[in-house]
Amino acid sequence: MEKVQQLGKKLIQVGQTLTSAESLTGGLFSSSLTQVPGISKVLPGAFVTYSPEAKTQLVGVPAPLIQEYGVVSAEVAKAMAKGAQQQLSTDWAISFTGVAGPDALEGHLAGEVWIGVAAPKNQVLARQFNFKGTRDTVRMAAVQAGAAWVLSELNKVVTNENN
C-alpha cells in the first residue's frame, strides 16, 4: 500500500486532517493508513458505511439520494465524502462505494468503484474506476487509487498555498 503510506506521511508533514467513509473497502483504507507512524495526529477517525442505512445514519447521505441514484454512483460517493468531512471537521475526506464482486449490484458489474473526495473550501469530486480481478484485488486497487488521487489533490493545494 505504497500510495497510502505516501499520503499518510504527506498529511502529517503539512498538518492536514483526513477521514474516510468506506463501503466496499470495509475499512481497508483507514486500516492501511494507520500503519503510518504518527497518523493519529491527522486521522481522527473513519466510518465503515457498508449498508445504505449506515450511509444515512453515520455520514448523513440522504435516503432519497440513495433511492434515486443507487449506492454505486457519483452522487452517493460525493455525499459520503462530504458527510464524513462534516462529521469529523477534517480538511479532507475520501469515500469508496462500488461493487467488489463477485456478483453485480444494482446492475453494476463487479469492479465498478466510485471514489469521492471532499477537499478544503467546499470542493467535492467523484471519479469512476473499473478494476479487474478478485474481490480483494478490487478492494486493494480502490484503496491505492483513492490514496493516489487524494495525494495528488493535496499536493496541488500545498503548492498553491506556497505560491
Image (cartoon, rainbow, N blue to C red):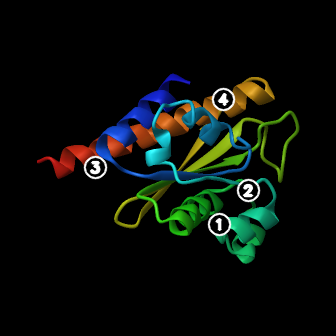
In the picture, the disc for residue 50 is none
- Of residue 103 and residue 152, the one placed in the foreground of this image is 152
Location of residue 144 in the rendering, given as x and y in whole percent from the top left corner: 56, 31
The CA span between labels 2 and 1 is: 8 Å
The CA span between labels 2 and 4 is: 17 Å
Q: Nearer the viewer, mark 1 or mark 4?
A: 1
Location of residue 111 in the rendering, given as x and y in whole percent from the top left corner: 72, 35
Give the residue number, with chain letter if any, for mark 2. Answer: 49
In the picture, the disc for residue 157 is 3
Q: Quadrant of the N terminus?
A: top right
Tell me the quarter of the picture where residue 7 sits.
Answer: top left
Of the numbered discs 2 and 3, the one sitting upstream in the chain is: 2
- Of residue 38 and residue 112, the one placed in the foreground of this image is 38
- Of residue 75 and residue 13, the one placed in the foreground of this image is 13
Disc 4 marks which amino acid? Met
Give the residue number, with chain letter if any, for mark 4. Answer: 140
Q: Residue furthest right?
A: 103
